Image (spheres, rainbow, N blue to C red):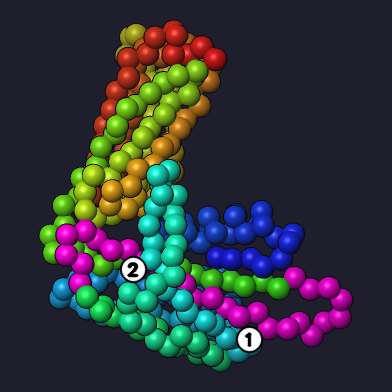
Amino acid sequence: MTIIGNRCRSLAAVLTAVVMLTFLFSGWAQAGTFKVSPIRIDLDKDTKSGFVTVVNDGAERINTQIKLFEWTQDADGKDVYTESNDLIYFPRIMTINAGEERILRVGLKAPAIAKEKTYRVFIEEIPQPKKAPGAQVAIAIRFGVPIFVKPVKEEPKGALVGLELSGGVLKVPVRNEGNTHFTITAISVKGANVKGEEVFSRDLTGWYLLGGSSRLYSAQIGDACKDIAALTVEVQTNKFNLTGNINVNEAMCRP
């Protein structure tokens, strides 16, 4: 989701997070006056096209523009978007009357072979001029629907590479070593004392991790660190689970 206006950048970050969580955990995604379904498209050699339904739930007509971006992740696991024409998609502009719905169609030009290709098709509302007098902040709301073009043979694989506790901060590096994405649904951190009793628990929120990408998660252990003899980390994904352990000593807890 994108907010246009100098005073709205922090709000944009919050709204973007809300929308992305909506994509993961519901059948519809919605903001402002329109909603979209489905929340993702999967294409392969047998399924060469898909569609997205856009519904105008508002009381006024809306205009939207559609753009396709290739979706990759950088060395820190942050999402990177580059405008692309790899897929066929139409229409590029949609006018939707109040209470109506329109269909956006997406199709393959060529299938993926060895590694999954990932994209997002962004449906963005074009703000209309405000009739009310005085200064107005234009708001442009957009959804980025994930598109996954699967390889001929999916080989999901992940690893925890170099778990580390230093200065009372636990670092959890997760690497996708496969040729297809997976979704990190939860990261659970538990600490036990020398008697094996649980004295610390923390849950972290995950996200998509694309093939070949890595992302570093961290957890502040705090004062509980001095009582912990062992830490256990479990990363739950939609395809497999990863587990790691650290034997804790006093030096790891010092600032």
Alpha-carbon span between mark 1 and mark 2: 30 Å
Taking the magenta stretch, the answer to whether it contains residue 127 is yes
Q: Is residue 93 left or right of residue 180?
A: right
Which of the two discs, 1 and 2, labels the residue nearer the N terminus? 1
What residue did someone put label 1 on?
59
Residue 229: which numbered mark, if any?
A: none
Q: Residue at x 39, y 62 (%)?
A: 71
User: In the rendered structure, which segment of residues is drawn in magenta?
Assistant: 111-137
Q: Amino acid at mark 1?
A: Ala
The residue singled out by tag 2 in the image is 147
Measured as percent of width and height from the top left, residue 18 is found at 53, 57
Quadrant housing residue 95:
bottom right
In front of the other: 84 or 77: 84
Which mark is in front, 1 or 2? 2
Secondary structure found at label 2: strand
Considering the image in quadrants, where does the N terminus appear?
bottom right
